[in-house]
Amino acid sequence: MEKISLITGATGHIGYALLKELVDSGEKVRILIRKDVPVFDGIDCEKVYGDVTDSESLDKAFEGVDVVYHLAGVIDINPGMEDLTWRVNVNGTKNVVRACERCNVRRLVYASSVDAFPPLPDNRVMTELDHFSPKNLDGTYAKTKAIATQFVLDNVHDGKLDAVVVHPGACIGPYDFKVSSVGEMVRMFINGNFPCSLSFGAYNFVDVRDVAKGMHAAAEKGKKGDCYIL
């Protein structure tokens, strides 16, 4: 039987880049989407309709799947988005994990974020962690990613799940159709509407295509329970 890889969040910047990476590598890919959009026209992938917040919709989507790449999430940090962010980022991830267990998915690759890491003093370089807590984090997005990441790792440690976690940085590059916050910042800067400089520290930009390749490699070569900064 041909192996199937499934992507949640394929309409997002990283998700679409990952879809292109997997299809170009010759893999059979299924995407979980809430509605069809023109960006998928001409791409050889199977579309299944559902939502990570609807656990029942995941069983059909995950049936016969070898690897699940879970990228669906809410990144919006604007006021009023807190409830949706918790519902998608935390509850949605719990639904995905449980569906992987029910459907005997071989491996889950969970897209966390570098925002799940607590800030370090004196501009110290980050390195991978094996435990995540929302205690020292600011903002709903960062807290939800830390909680969801720890939930994934707890299920790995309990022997219920084979999963690896990746932590992408601020992605730039093609396929940013919905214009991410980072993409909008870059556009404003290029157009002269956002003059800025970094007076301290740094910002962790990464090409979205490299993140996609890193996620693909994590699925094939990553060690169960490990986390990887991309």
Image (tube, rainbow, N blue to C red):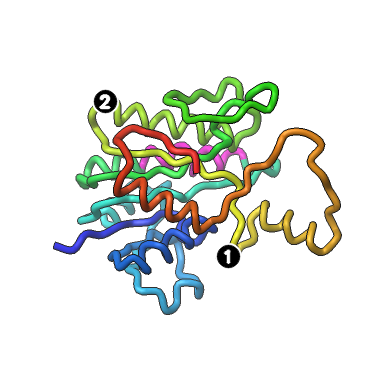
Taking the spot 36% from the left edge, 46% from the top edge, the residue there is 218
**Residue 192 relative to residue 223: left or right:** right
Q: The disc labelled 1 sits on which kind of residue? A: Pro
Q: What range of the chain is rendered magenta? A: 82-95
In the picture of the structure, the residue carrying the numbered disc 2 is 158
Q: The disc labelled 2 sits on which kind of residue? A: Asp
Question: x, y (%) of residue 35?
Answer: 46, 66
Residue 204: numbered disc: none
**Residue 97 relative to residue 115: left or right:** left
Let me know if residue 224 is in the magenta part: no
In the picture of the structure, the residue carrying the numbered disc 1 is 174
Bin the neighbour count of mark 1 within 10 Å (Cα to Cα): few under 14, some 14-19, many 20 and up.
some
Bin the neighbour count of mark 2 within 10 Å (Cα to Cα): few under 14, some 14-19, many 20 and up.
few
Tell me the element at label 1: loop
Q: Is residue 211 above or below residue 173?
A: above
Answer with the quarter of the image where residue 137 lies.
Answer: top right
Tell me the element at label 2: loop
Q: CA distance from mark 2 to mark 1?
A: 39 Å
Taking the spot 63% from the left edge, 43% from the top edge, the residue there is 204
Q: Earlier in the sequence, mark 2 or mark 1?
A: 2
Quadrant of image for the N terminus: bottom left
Residue 182 visible? The answer is yes
Question: x, y (%) of residue 103?
Answer: 22, 47
- Name the foreground residue: 98 vs 201: 201
Question: x, y (%) of residue 30?
Answer: 33, 63
Taking the spot 42% from the left edge, 25% from the top edge, the residue there is 130
What secondary structure predominates along the stretch shown in magenta? helix
